[in-house]
Image (spheres, grey):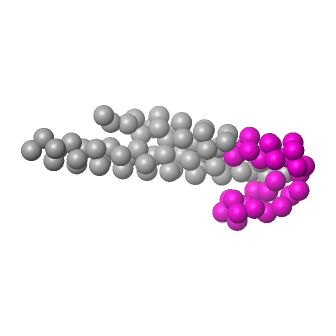
C-alpha cells in the first residue's frame, strides 16, 4: 500500500497545527495567558502562551507538519517498496 504524499502531508499539517492551536487556547482558558516562553517556543520563534502566540504557533506548526508529513509518507513509500520486493523473492 502506498501513501498519497500530498494528502498525508496536508492532513498531518492540519492535525499538528490545529492541535497546537487548540492546546494553547486550552491552557489560556484554564490558566490564563501568561506569555511564557515554553519548550515549543524555543523551537517555534514567537510562540508563547497568548492569543497572538497561538496564531504564530499555528503558522509554524502548519509548515512543520507539512514538511514532516511529506518526509514521513515519502520514506514510508520507499521502505514499503523495498520490503515488499524482498518479501516476494
Count of numbered circles on the image = 0
Q: Is residue 60 left or right of residue 13?
A: right
In percent of width and height, residue 52 lies at 83, 49
Q: Is residue 1 left or right of residue 22?
A: left
In percent of the image, x 38 and y 36: which residue is there?
3
Q: Magenta segment, which residues?
A: 20-49
38 in magenta: yes
**Residue placed furthest toward the front:** 30
In percent of width and height, residue 51 lies at 84, 47
Quadrant occupied by the C terminus: top left
In percent of the image, x 71 and y 51: which residue is there?
57
Q: Is residue 48 visible?
A: yes
In percent of width and height, residue 12 lies at 54, 41
Residue in front for this viewpoint, 43 or 29: 29
In percent of the image, x 87 and y 44: which residue is there?
30
In percent of width and height, residue 28 lies at 85, 46
Q: Is residue 37 left or right of residue 18?
A: right
**Residue placed furthest toward the left:** 89
Q: Is residue 52 visible?
A: no
Quadrant occupied by the N terminus: top left
Amino acid at each position: 500500500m502506498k501513501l498519497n504524499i500530498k494528502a498525508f502531508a496536508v492532513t498531518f499539517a492540519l492535525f499538528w497545527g490545529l492541535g497546537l492551536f487548540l492546546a494553547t487556547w486550552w491552557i489560556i482558558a484554564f490558566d490564563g495567558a501568561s506569555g511564557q516562553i515554553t519548550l515549543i517556543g524555543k523551537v517555534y520563534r514567537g510562540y508563547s502562551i497568548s492569543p497572538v502566540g497561538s496564531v504564530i504557533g499555528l503558522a509554524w506548526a502548519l509548515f512543520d507538519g507539512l514538511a514532516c508529513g511529506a518526509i514521513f509518507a515519502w520514506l514510508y513509500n520507499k521502505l514499503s517498496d523495498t520490503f515488499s520486493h524482498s518479501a516476494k523473492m
